[in-house]
Amino acid sequence: MSLSYDQVVIRYGDLTVKGRNRNSFEKRMLQQIKAALSEFEAVTYFKDFGRLYIKLNGESYEQIKDRLKDLFGITSFSPVVCAETELGAIQAAALAMINELKQKPKTFKVSAKRAWKKFPHTSQEMNHLVGSHVLRATPDLKVDVHLPEVELRVDIQEEATYLFHEVAPAAGGFPYGTNGKAMLLLSGGIDSPVAGWLAMRKGLELEAVHFHSYPYTSDQAKEKVIALARRLSYYSGVPLKLHLVPFTDIQMRIVEAKQESLIITLMRRAMLRITERLAEANGAGGIVTGESLGQVASQTLTSMDVIGRAADLPLIKPLIAMDKHEIIRMAEKIDTYTTSILPYEDCCTLFVPKSPAIHPNLKFVEKLEGYMPEMTELIEAAVSGTEQLLLTPDSKLSEQSAGKDDWF
């Protein structure tokens, strides 16, 4: 008997704690899997015992695996061989599965589960009956019930018996968009794309906001951010809207205030005010940032407090307790790192003071902003001048200026 996978079993992660809301989450999960696998026309789907099954119907498991591993809401999945619920058929399928392994193991174990209680052999008996059949045919193989190289799982149901050994990890979390919508402050650096991925993993739908300072920032810096946003759209499975905000006039006015140590504080407060306006216009209920506590001067607890008070919406900071090497490792995993380190500056690097304030005084900052009443008008101009791009992983850039909502 040669091995041919019949199905893929999908396991949920955090969805299992959703109680009464679980049904709607599972429906969304199924929608996203169908969209991700739309090119595989032969596959079909069914749900049973709190899990989702994909019938391959001849489609390539390896190709489907590549897409499933990145889908939010899936904690793991396994390719399954179906056998008739009869001892001889189960034994033959188990032996075929062991024989077809690319790397031949030295040890294995059988873990049988008899869900259909009318089957004549208990789970323990099946462990022995299947295991001994495999051992007789493969004398170099040994049983190790504690740390086997391969664990062969046998799920005995009335309609069929399902056998598998591979448990492929996936992204986990919640299906994309099931926990609301937020705006992501997307710079061209390492941190913010990782923060975006983590927020998406928790079920947040995202729109990205990037601040540029033409002519001080280059077209290459803009293309870099577009590439990062496009990569994030791959994980969402749907187009991602990127807001490109003109920030030059605001930056120049802040520099004119001649409070060098507070330039970054004032800039980031202005960014939050603009992002909050964009959030209100686009139905978002929070703002995601790439801040990590203590990483730079603007990310001390005092600085984050003073900056954060400029916005009323919740500020979501997925990286807050992560070290830089952890963030870099995750950026490499999600394939944003090589883009993020391209040497094109964003607006935040243009006017970095030699000695930025690490403990800014809120009352002084608010008083200073009071001396710049024209900032309200400049913020309005930045919002109205925002350019919107709708990005997908593979399609060409779609572009439309702000204010033409019918394009979306």
Image (tube, rainbow, N blue to C red):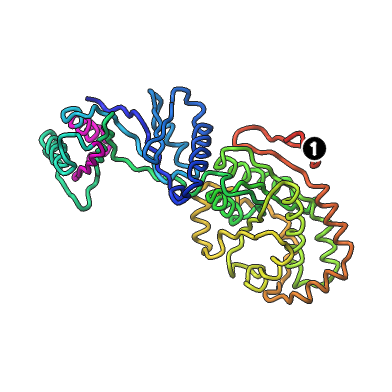
Residue 216, percent across and down?
A: 78, 54
Magenta stretch: includes residue 97? yes
Residue 171, percent across and down?
A: 47, 46
Identified at 50% across, 32% down, the residue is: 34
Identified at 57% across, 49% down, the residue is: 179
Residue 300, percent across and down?
A: 63, 71
Judge left or right: residue 53 versus residue 387: left
In the image, 220 versus 72, the foreground residue is 72
SS of the residue under disc 1? loop
Magenta stretch: includes residue 7? no
Give the magenta-colored segment's residue range: 91-116
Numbered disc total: 1
Q: Quadrant of residue 154?
A: top left
Judge left or right: residue 106 versus residue 360: left
* Residue at image mark 1: 404
Residue 187 visible: no
In the depicted structure, whether residue 294 falls above or below residue 235: below
Judge left or right: residue 20 versus residue 406: left
In the depicted structure, whether residue 182 falls above or below residue 94: below
